[in-house]
Image: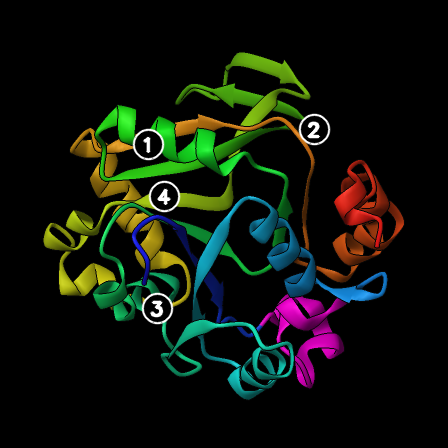
Amino acid sequence: MKKNKKSMIILCGGKGKRMGKITQTIPKPMIKIGKKTILEHKLKYYKSQNIQNFIFCLGYKSEVIKNFLKRKKIKSKNIDSGINAGILKRIFKAKELIQKNTLISYGDTLAQINFNSLINSHKKSKNLITLVAAPIKNPFGLLNWNKNKRAIKFEEKPILNHFIGYAVINPEIFKILSKKIINMGDGKGMVEAIKLLIQKKEVNIYTFDDLQITINSPEELKYAKLNYKKYFTLDEKFKK
């Protein structure tokens, strides 16, 4: 791959069980929002940010995505880890293609991130991983109490910060992660890896408070279909 262009790992291997019947025939990134699939929206924005090297980590219904990439003539490296591999295992399977700081994106999240700014933040931090975090308002009042069940804290609808499925990793990260963590199922390996890296002071945070949509459930898909135009008509390149 050319060194002067940014690389992006796109994680498209999950079963998307929370989507119900929708993902029984197609993987979640192939769900349509408007006239385009989630994956088409993502790729269009990535290309506008000069990301040309795509690494797809596949699993569930991988042939559907492979056929889409072939039909759209999208050049990519495809790593199929099967349907049971966890998120971290899928990334690990692609480690031979990770020659430098590499962007990572979950296949079900749309966000208008400035990737040059994100990569510069990662480089400046000199950490092994940078996580993109965004604020979210908790809709509930949260209580904390002591061992005697006496309330010690109450917060009404606090603002929390959550990982939105975008990151940058340094290939050196694989030297400190054990096989046990890498082989954990679902997202458990990713969680344990982040906890370990936090202990080692190797996690940088890039804060993001702009346009984003995550599709994890039919309710979120409904919201996305009603609001996606806010995200992709602000700029002329998204109007076509």
Q: Secondary structure at mark 4?
A: strand
Q: Are marks 1 and 4 in contact (CB under 8 Å)?
A: yes
Quadrant in which the C terminus appears: bottom right
The residue that mark 1 highlights is: 122
Mark 2 or 3, nearer chain start: 3
Q: Which label sits in the foreground, 3 or 4?
A: 4
Residue type highlighted by circle 4: Val
Q: Earlier in the sequence, mark 1 or mark 2?
A: 1
Q: Can you say whether 193 is above or below 32 in the image?
A: above
**Residue type (three-letter) at the residue carrying disc 1:** His
- Dot 2 corresponds to which residue? 140
Is residue 99 rendered magenta in the image? no
Q: Residue 168: horizontal and vertical position, in percent? A: 36, 43
- Name the amino acid type tagged 3: Arg
Q: Which residue is mark 3?
A: 90
Q: Of label 1 and label 4, which has the lower sequence position? A: 1
